[in-house]
Image: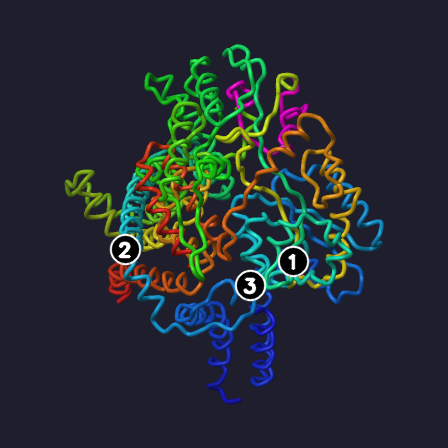
């Protein structure tokens, strides 16, 4: 029990737990993706090795690439919208009077804290084909939306999904960016103003660089979250629409594995999604690492 | 998973023999286990099969009447003092996926599950259910509905027993028939289609259904496919060949499209789970629903008892005037192979097949699981329609992986797209491809 083993000993439990909590599922998934693993295996039959067969089946299936494109597009549109609206609201919040700000914060917090499934039930009611208030309002406003099926066409399905996802993610961006904005040094802003910098110039040259590290983290998290969006799509698919035309990677993997009972191919698809996430987020991670130096 | 975690951490502590490490590890471990162990607080107390346990029964949808549920719980708990029986209601939609995950876990599996007759094969062929072959005689033997015993059997062993049967028949509004000048209950498929269109025309409302047919309702849509001589798939050598593109099938699917377009006011992407709201809003002239829906329609709180007198029923007629081949609906019950309480679960299944319990089901319009109880349905027009509809009822293809076709919503997608006005031949060919891939 030398002096050197103490720090090591203190670190090891955390490492061991991490290895168990993150490493085990990952290893299991890699193994699974190389096996013929169906329902029978799930209930105890020995799995057969498939080598790279699952990956080959997956990559040669045109269905996957359509889903990938759709997922990436959905991710960037949603992350972009969330970020733009979030930043706008955060800037607005910094200029609000205290009571108004507290009111806005409460509203945002409620949207953020609402359990996804409960929120989805309400959104489904709003967009219901026959009895939805959205159709009713639009009809009152002069359009003919009686019996309009919002989830019927893929594009309007994703419009609804985007509204829901953005609505749910904006509060986090607002809170984080608002917190960052309060840390922008007042004296630098004042100095810039005295030197004749306008509002826009101050924003671009003082505020943005000051909150840059937080911006990067928020964008990174948003991209990851919007890539793996699942519950919202899954619930909307159950409410209506054609599931084959509206699958994103998350629901696609779920369809392969849990609904279709082909866990091997589903695991291979999940590995693919992991690689996609790493590729898409690599630039941000690199930027963040650079900043650390 | 949790156990190995604990073991490794303990071994590790001994090796290090460092108190501080132990504290850190234990704290971390407590954090880790409390996060994932919150939902099975009753897990440990009930193990060991000592005769006292908490039995969990999964029943699906609103099919099983409340009286039957209460009777089952009370009787079971009386007969097994110290044990409890909890009924957890599951939605039919997404049932296969929920069973796939729940049945594999010894800690979380329900003990007794209800499964749709067409879904049973998916689980019986992979060893998810306990073998009930030895108990078959005690549960009813040859008296049990043979088609359902067959649905629950594989390689001569029975893993799931019948729970109830029931096919949908047509509910109609007598007053609306009269108003539209439809004087007789339709006797052939052609009459039926004509009556449905007439009712819709007469109403003059876009969201009114002469025949209520939500776009995703392939289970009722199947009747038109079969009536035209088509089918979903046919055996082909060792495997299966999807047959939705056969000329007969196409004809049937076109009838469905025609009915949806000119007689239904239901959304093209809705399913058949909520007939009560539109019916009670006066938006339905006819609809195909199982008998127990009558109870929901006339319910004081959620239904519209004032319409009860106007409701008539008949079995959907086929092209030849005999009852049309409708989907033979119904359920099987099975015991999870992973359930630690096999004996108590068997006792619960016995109760569910008992005369008392099955009588309650029959009175609610469900065809009992034993043939000798059929008379308990009564002899009113509902019983008549039930018996007629069942006389020509048909099953989905008995392929082992049929449930994944259902689970992946292949048919919901197909019917919904047809309802949206899609090209029937093209959509049928696409669906054939998907079904072939799933079944073989």
**Callout 1: residue from which chain?**
B
Q: In this view, does B302 lie above or below A156?
A: above
Q: Distance between the residues labelled 1 and 3?
A: 26 Å
A30 displayed left or right of A46: left
Residue at coordinates 70% horizontally, 33% vertically from top-left?
Answer: B364
Query: Could you tell me which quadrant the C terminus of chain A lies in?
Result: bottom left
Over which residues does the magenta segment extend? Answer: B279-306
The mark closer to the camera, 1 or 3, is 3
Any part of residue A250 in sight: yes
B387 displayed left or right of B278: right
Q: Which of marks 1 and 3 is nearer the N terminus?
A: 1
| Same chain? Circles 2 and 1 | no
Any part of residue A120 in sight: no
Residue labelled with disc 3: B126
Label 3, secondary structure: give it: loop
Residue B217 sits inside the magenta stretch: no
Q: Percent position (x, y) of residue A190?
A: 24, 43
Name the residue nearer the viewer: B116 or A115.
B116
Q: Percent position (x, y) of residue B200?
A: 45, 18
A247 displayed left or right of B200: left
Residue labelled with disc 1: B40
Residue labelled with disc 2: A62
Residue B291 sits inside the magenta stretch: yes
Quadrant of res A291: bottom left
**Callout 3: residue from which chain?**
B
Q: Distance between the residues labelled 2 and 1?
A: 42 Å
């Amino acid at each position: 029990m030398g002096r050197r083993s103490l720090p090591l000993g203190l670190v090891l439990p955390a490492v061991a737990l991490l290895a168990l909590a993150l490493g085990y599922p990952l290893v299991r998934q890699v193994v699974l993706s190389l096996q013929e693993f169906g329902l029978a295996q799930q209930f105890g039959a020995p799995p057969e090795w498939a080598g790279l067969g699952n990956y080959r089946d997956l990559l040669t299936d045109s269905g996957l690439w359509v889903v990938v494109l759709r997922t990436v597009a959905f991710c960037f549109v949603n992350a972009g919208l969330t970020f733009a609206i979030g930043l706008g609201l955060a800037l607005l919040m910094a200029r609000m009077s205290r009571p108004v700000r507290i009111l806005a914060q409460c509203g945002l917090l409620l949207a953020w804290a609402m359990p996804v499934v409960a929120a989805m039930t309400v959104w489904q009611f709003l967009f219901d084909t026959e009895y939805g208030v959205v159709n009713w309002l639009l009809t009152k406003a002069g359009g003919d939306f009686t019996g309009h099926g919002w989830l019927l066409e893929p594009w309007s399905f994703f419009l609804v999904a985007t509204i829901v996802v953005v609505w749910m993610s904006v509060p986090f961006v607002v809170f984080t960016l608002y917190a960052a904005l309060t840390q922008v040094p007042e004296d630098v802003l004042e100095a810039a103003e005295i030197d004749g910098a306008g509002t826009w110039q101050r924003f671009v040259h003082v505020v943005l660089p000051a909150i840059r590290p937080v911006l990067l983290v928020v964008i990174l998290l948003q991209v990851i979250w919007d890539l793996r969006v699942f519950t919202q799509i899954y619930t909307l698919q159950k409410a209506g629409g054609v599931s084959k035309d509206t699958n994103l990677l998350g629901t696609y993997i779920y369809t392969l594995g849990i609904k279709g009972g082909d866990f091997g191919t589903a695991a291979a698809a999940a590995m693919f999604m992991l690689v996609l996430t790493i590729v898409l987020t690599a630039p941000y991670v690199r930027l963040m690492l650079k900043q650390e130096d | 998973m949790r156990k190995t975690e604990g073991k490794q951490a303990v071994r590790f502590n001994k090796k290090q023999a460092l108190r501080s490490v132990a504290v850190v590890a234990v704290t971390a471990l407590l954090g880790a286990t409390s996060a994932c162990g919150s939902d099975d607080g009753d897990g440990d107390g009930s193990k060991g099969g000592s005769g006292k346990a908490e039995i969990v029964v999964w029943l699906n949808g609103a099919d099983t009447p409340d009286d039957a549920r209460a009777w089952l719980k009370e009787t079971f708990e009386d007969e097994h003092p110290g044990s409890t029986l909890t009924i957890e209601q599951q939605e039919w939609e997404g049932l296969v996926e929920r069973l796939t995950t729940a049945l594999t876990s010894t800690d979380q599996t329900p003990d007794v599950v209800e499964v749709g007759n067409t879904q049973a094969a998916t689980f019986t062929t992979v060893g998810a259910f306990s073998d009930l072959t030895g108990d078959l005689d005690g549960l009813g033997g040859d008296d049990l509905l043979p088609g359902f015993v067959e649905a629950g059997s594989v390689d001569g062993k029975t893993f799931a027993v019948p729970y109830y049967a029931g096919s949908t028949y047509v509910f109609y509004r007598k007053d609306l028939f009269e108003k539209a000048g439809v004087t007789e209950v339709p006797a052939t498929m052609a009459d039926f289609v004509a009556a449905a269109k007439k009712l819709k025309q007469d109403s003059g409302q876009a969201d009114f259904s002469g025949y209520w047919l939500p776009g995703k309702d392939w289970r009722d849509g199947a009747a038109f496919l079969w009536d035209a001589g088509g089918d979903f798939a046919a055996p082909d050598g060792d495997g299966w060949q999807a047959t939705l593109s056969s000329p007969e099938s196409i004809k049937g699917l076109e009838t469905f499209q025609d009915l949806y377009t000119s007689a239904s006011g239901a959304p093209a992407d809705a399913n058949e789970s909520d007939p009560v709201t539109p019916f009670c809003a006066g938006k339905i002239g006819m609809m195909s629903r199982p008998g127990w829906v009558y109870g929901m329609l006339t319910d004081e709180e959620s239904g519209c008892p004032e319409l009860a007198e106007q409701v008539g029923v008949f079995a959907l007629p086929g092209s030849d005037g005999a009852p049309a081949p409708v989907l033979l609906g119904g359920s099987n019950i099975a015991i999870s192979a992973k359930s630690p309480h096999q004996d108590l679960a068997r006792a619960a299944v016995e109760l569910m097949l008992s005369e008392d319990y099955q009588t309650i089901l029959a009175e609610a319009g469900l065809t009992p699981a034993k043939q000798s109880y059929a008379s308990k349905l009564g002899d009113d027009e509902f019983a008549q329609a039930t018996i007629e509809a069942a006389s020509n009822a048909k099953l989905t293809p008995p392929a082992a992986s049929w449930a994944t076709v259902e689970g992946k919503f292949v048919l919901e997608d197909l019917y919904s797209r047809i309802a949206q006005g899609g090209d029937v031949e093209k959509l049928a060919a696409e669906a054939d491809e998907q079904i072939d891939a799933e079944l073989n």
